[in-house]
Image (cartoon, coloured by chain):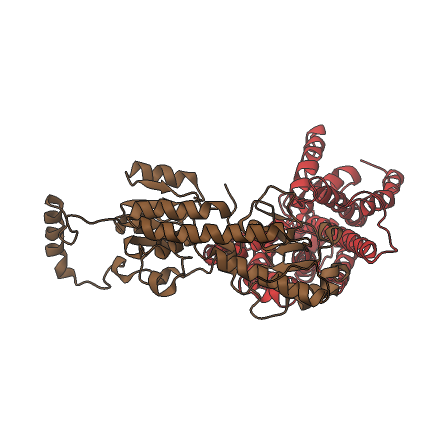
Chain colours: A brown, B red
Amino acid sequence: MRAQPPATVDHARRKNRDPRNGRAPGAPRRLLVPLALLLLAGCARPPAEQPADAGLRLISTAPHLTECVCAIGARDALAGRTESCDYPPEAVRDIPVTGGFGTPWLEPLLAARPTHVLETVLADPEIRRRLDALKIPVVHVPCTRLAEIPDALRQLGTLTGHAAQAEALASSIRSGLDAAQAENARRANRPRVLLLFAPDTPITAGRHAFIAELLALAGGMNVGRDASADYYHVSVEWILEQNPDLILCVFETSGHDPLTLFGSQTGWNALDAVRHRRVYTVPDLNTVSRPGPRVLEGLAQLRDILVADARRSSPSDPAAPVSK
Amino acid sequence: MLTTRQILLWLIPIPFLLGICLLAGSSGFGLPDTATATGRALLELRLSRLLTGFVVGAALSCSGCALQAVLRNALAEPYVLGVSSGGSLGAALVIATGLSALTPLALPGGAFLAAALTLLLVCLLAGRSNGYSPNTLILTGVVTGSMLSSLLMLLLSFAQTRAVHSITWWLLGNLQATSWPLILSVTLLVTLALGVLCCEARTLNALLLGHEAAYNLGVRTRFSVPLILTAATLAAAAAVAVSGIIGFVGLIVPHALRRLAGANHRTLLPCAALFGGTFLVVCDTFARTLFAPHEIPVGVITALSGGPFFLYLLTRKGRQPLA
């Protein structure tokens, strides 16, 4: 099983689920017989509310897939989303919740009468077999790495009939990433960055994690890059040995300065990053942890942090990363 | 069974073992260079971890010894009265509400508070009926524990992915305590609790014969039993607060030592403190160095290394586990 990004999600609660899926509370008992008759009648011919050409009814099983579908203008094709999907807020609010990130709930999913289920990482492969058994086509959209985003958009564009919009968005993201790559190649000075995903246990990212790719592109050097695991626990001793130049907190701090947290823990005060107060938080966690259409915003966030840090730590150093 | 002299001989290697554990770390073997700030921090880190490991190991082993005797049950362990479930729920609440991002003391504080409340609840409930009978105590503890565990599962099913990771890792147990004040207060609490248990060693010996027999031998069971339960469980709660749930030590070390050193609690309890503490420190050294920089849960090592040894002791000769 592939680890899910720890910082990705602000879960919407199940109670936000579309009321249409809920049963009408306290239906009078005398209605039961006519209702049963109606149901029986319904078995004979196709349900009346479903038009002949129902079109696409997609179920998204990941917040970044939802973002991708909305970004290419195919919001109306979405019939179900995860409880983590929160962007774009006004567009996803009314979509029924049919599962968690990578964990579809079968009953609400079936109730949404899907034509396709979009999937990038499923928590349990068994789900896939269940959906196959139910004859619901599952579309695998590879979208966990930076380089996969443009093609994922194109694939969704073809599926939803929004190929032109998808192509435009994909190529603008591609050129944005290429520009960052070119800028990155000219960079001489790369600060060594520790990515930290929780305030209470040191979890960091290996080189393949999405945010680690983003950090490398923004001009930082991830100290956890030797590991191939996406996210893993490390010891404070290892962090001390690495002695990163700066620490990037990828978790909700609720406005509190993480420095005060680290300053009071054994060992952390010896870190250069803590002593020189080079500890930063990422303002919008979702853009840096979701491989979706807002990837360039996430990249800009990380670059802004690194640029501000370089200015602060060495105002006269010409080798510092320069802002575009 | 070992004689007193043999037990004393077994004590000799302990300081050396602890010394070796201090030298080992994920950054390499050897004493860190104390001339640099990083080296000093490394040494401080290892020292704090060593002390935490020793205190937690001692607390869990002694707690297990006392609970097995007072509950007259070979399966009793420090968490039998529900402190682990209570502590987990407390810690999970602190993590899920984001309080743990404010101060490092919030997490152990929440865990200890919840564990102590659980103990209070279990003792109040079990004491209402026929005066702390072992079966009532165990059943009350197990049922309270399961109820708290299901609350924890409910919390986990609603928690954010990030919080789920932190909670799961906490549940697996980790000996990297965050600050010296925490370690020192836990050490103080555990020392107090173990002191009480050692003072009650004769009572524990009598309780092994059954509560009624102990009463007839002059043990004030209405006073001693709750005292021992409280001391043993608070030691476990302090251990849980600083290190999460570390299984196996509290169950296996007491049994192994009872086979080696006998069931007299006047020697058994000090032995449990020393050997249990050392055992956990050694296991933790493996946990943090085997797959460095990955850390693996220390509970994996305690079970995998202690289990076979215990099974060997168990099958060597046909003695009753609590005899």
Q: Residue A266: x percent and y percent?
A: 74, 60
Residue B282, relative to residue A274: is it above or below? above
Residue A2, relative to residue A37: is it above or below? above
In-front residue for pair B305/A255: A255
Q: Residue furthest bottom?
A: A255
In this picture, residue B72 sits left or right of residue B32: left
What is the number of callouts on the image?
0
In this picture, residue A201 sits left or right of residue B6: left
In this picture, residue B68 sits left or right of residue A6: right
Q: Is residue A234 visible?
A: yes
In-front residue for pair A234/B199: A234
Quadrant of the rendered image containing residue B222: bottom right
Q: Residue furthest top?
A: B316
Residue at 27% from the left image edge and 50% from the top image edge: A57
Residue at 54% from the left image edge and 60% from the top image edge: A300
Q: Residue A35: x percent and y percent?
A: 13, 55
The quadrant the C terminus of chain A occupies is: bottom right
In-front residue for pair B181/B4: B181
